[in-house]
Structures are given as structure tokens and as C-alpha cells.
Image: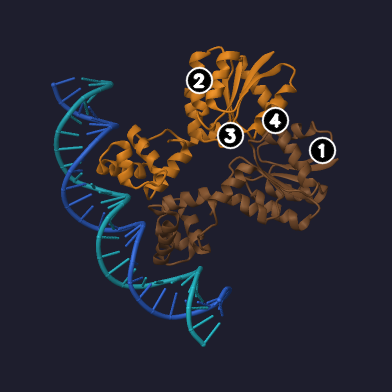
Chain colours: A orange, B brown, C cyan, D blue
Amino acid sequence: MIRILLADDEHLIRGAMAALLALEDDLEVVAQAATGAEALATARVVRPDVAVIDLQMPDLDGVSVAQALASELPSCSTMIVTSHGRPGHLKRALAAGVRGFLPKTVSSDVLATVVRTVHSGGRYVDPALAAEAISAGDNPLTPREADVLELALEGAPIEEIARRASLSPGTVRNYLSSAVGKTGASNRHEAARFARARGWI
Amino acid sequence: MIRILLADDEHLIRGAMAALLALEDDLEVVAQAATGAEALATARVVRPDVAVIDLQMPDLDGVSVAQALASELPSCSTMIVTSHGRPGHLKRALAAGVRGFLPKTVSSDVLATVVRTVHSGGRYVDPALAAEAISAGDNPLTPREADVLELALEGAPIEEIARRASLSPGTVRNYLSSAVGKTGASNRHEAARFARARGWI
DNA sequence: AAAAAGCCATGACAGATGTCATGTCGTCCG
DNA sequence: CGGACGACATGACATCTGTCATGGCTTTTT
């Protein structure tokens, strides 16, 4: 019997997924959580075999939870399900020790199969997402460029970005300019959206 | 027995919701669809009592489907479930004749209850979403302002917005300026994000 | 009919932004 | 060690944006 922890902030979906997994004879949902922090706390107590975690949650993001889980509970395999499959997330997730990565568009038997796969030591990444990740290419942005671009995402003026990043406005403009060049965009806002779409920030 | 049509592009979630609804004695999921168009086509054939539709789908958006359904199949009550509850959507949905509006964070028994409520002629809107919608207030943007702001969302330069809206760049700047004033933002990008958050565009 | 409001446009001006050249300071690597 | 590279900064310049004043045109309201 494979003991599963389920974390998703959408009750409806979490409950529904639990119902689905319960239909399988060899799977058992032993705990559920609605936030990242809750998932971690619960996992420490119930020590599940497999953690099925939603990527986007109110507090901690799924990858952070996976990272913590990987170091604290090496016996627990983590897999991530997500609605919006952004390539960058996949990379970060894999780096965080995630064993399975699925969009929520898969069917329920795939989910069950992947749970078994990761539990037995295997890995599974949705083919479509993998293809996207490969085509997105590596992140060409330097760490600072990424920082600054991220702040630019909200549409803040350069002054504010500079303050928030503790940089001089001129430096911010340089980073932004270089990022705009690397993304092929025509201004920082477009560049920020682009980088976000690629999962670079 | 209440006959239900279920539409959601995420197979996993649709299947799971179907499993949940199937647990209720008086509910029966008679059809499922993965896109808006498919939902419409299916509804015409099976004529369900209640349509449970996801707000965001690849092609037609949930509200559009609801609108079409309302005119073509007046006997079918439509309700919408969504992950990202934006106030503007609620207003549009209600205007389109939707009878129920829920975030996916609700529990499964609420879902079943609401299905029964809308089927018996009642209405139900998630209290939290309703509160948000009220606090968001009415859309102060004129239609053109909204159009232009929407194009600005993607970060395009004014030139391109002007071309896409068939306006002169100067006019675009005027609309944008006025929209920036109405939203209290400090530039059009911030204004666009703000308006989006309010569901104004 | 007059007033109000929205739609479209132009022109002018200050300030914000994008681009480029240039330079300093560390760190890492061959 | 010397070179390459990234982080950080400044200054200068052209261009883009935001704002404001102004005006014409249509539709709705009073």
C-alpha cells in the first residue's frame, strides 16, 4: 500500500483527486493539506511514501515544498501537478529533486501510474511539458538581470525598481536594456512577460 | 435525477469532479467536455439539466458558453467554477444568465448543494467572491479606454497599440493617460495590471 | 435646443526610458 | 599572472511616454 500526501489549495480538486486515488487498491491518501506550510508540517508527522503537490499555492510554492521534503524526508518521493505548465518551473522542480511532473490535463489513470512509478524509484515528466522546456532553452539572463526583470514585472517605474533592488537607476536601466536585448523584446515590460512565459524569472 | 454536463479542460479535475458528483444519489453526470465548443455541441445533443462549466478553457471562455446556452437551452441552468476568481468575471457571468458561481476552493458537498440549488431555480454566488466584486466597484473606464488598456496589457509600445486599435498614437496616449488617472497607477502597465485585477478588462 | 458625455485627433513640453560608451572592482579559470 | 566575465556605476543622447490644452464630431440626457 502506497501512502500518499495530497496538497492543493483548491478543496474541490483536492477532494476530487483523493476520491480518484482512493479507487485504486494499492493507493491510500493518508493526509491532505491546503497550503505549502501545512503540507510540510503534515509530511513530517505522517511520513508519506509519495507527496503529490500542486505547483501554485497561497504561501510556499510547490517547488519549495519539494526542496524541503527532499532534504527532510528522503524516503518520500515528491511529484508535482500543475495547471499552468511553465517550462522554467519544470527545470526548477527537477533541480529540487522532484520525481514526477504532470499537468492537470492528464487522465486519472496516468496520475495513479505515475504515483506508482515515482514510488518505485522512477521518474516521469509529461512529454509535452518536457518538449516545451527543451524548446525554451537555457536562461540567458544573469542573476541580477533576472532580479531586476522580476521587479519590472509589476510595471513599477525604474526609480522604484532601483530602490527595491538597492541599485542605482542607471544600473537598473543597463540590466533592463541587456535583458530586453536578450529576449528580443521592445521594452522592459514585454521582456518581463516574455521571461516569465519562459520560466526564466 | 439531475442530469449534469461537466466542462473543464483539465482531464484530471474533470474526471475527479465527475467521480465526486457520482457519489450523490440524485446527481448524474451525463456528459463531459474539454473545450467550450465541445461543451456547446454536447449540450445541444444531451440537453442536460445543469451545466457545470470551468471559466477558463482553451477556446471559448466559460461565460460565452453560458451565454449561448442560456439562449439555446433555457431549460438548462448554468453554473461556473473557477480557479482564479476575478470580480469582473462574476459580473459578466451574471449578466450572461449564469445561476451559480463558485471558486474551486469550495468543498465537494457545497458543489453538490449548489447544483441542486440552481436546478431548482435558485442562485448561488460564493460569498467571498461577491464581497470582492462589490468592493471592486463599477468599471469607471469608457469602452475605448478599456480596449486600449487591454492591448497595453501585453506591454506593447504605443505605436503598436495604435495600429491594432486603428487609432492615432496621440489618441491612444490620451486614453491611456485618462485610464492611468482613473486607476491611480503611475504608468499604463501598472494601470493595465490593476484594471485586470479588478476585472475591468 | 442646450448641456453633458464620449470619441477622435493634434500639438507642445517635461520627464521617463532605452541605448551606448566607458570605467572600477572582484572572482574565477587556464 | 593575465584575461574573461559579471556586478555596479556614471554620463550623454535620442526617443518614448505621460500630461495638458484645445477643438471637432456624434449621441444621449435634460
Residue with the mark numbered 1:
B28
Q: Nearer the viewer, mark 1 or mark 2?
A: 1
Label of residue A97 in the image: 2
For the point 25% across and 44% down, the residue is A170
Q: Chain of mark 4?
A: A
Q: Quadrant of the C terminus of chain A?
A: top left
Residues at discs 3 and 2 in contact (Cβ within 8 Å): no
Query: Of callouts 3 and 2, which one flags the residue occurring earlier in the amino acid sequence?
Result: 2
For the point 70% across and 50% down, the residue is B37
Residue with the mark numbered 4:
A16
Tell me which corner region of the image, top left, top right, bottom left or bottom right, holds residue B74: bottom right
Residue with the mark numbered 3:
A128
**Rendered location of residue C18, percent (x, y):** 32, 50
Crowding around mark 1 (Cα neighbors within 10 Å: few <14, some 14 to 19, many 20+) is some
Up the image or down, A64 lies above or below B134; here it is above
Q: Chain of mark 1?
A: B
Query: Of callouts 4 and 2, which one flags the residue occurring earlier in the amino acid sequence?
Result: 4
For the point 33% across and 34% down, the residue is A144
Using the rendered image, report if marks 4 and 2 lie on a common chain. yes
For the point 33% across and 38% down, the residue is A164
Query: Of callouts 3 and 4, which one flags the residue occurring earlier in the amino acid sequence?
Result: 4
Residues at discs 3 and 4 in contact (Cβ within 8 Å): no
> Disc 2 residue type?
Gly
Crowding around mark 4 (Cα neighbors within 10 Å: few <14, some 14 to 19, many 20+) is many
Local secondary structure at mark 4: helix
Q: Nearer the viewer, mark 3 or mark 2?
A: 2
Q: CA distance from mark 4 to mark 1?
A: 16 Å
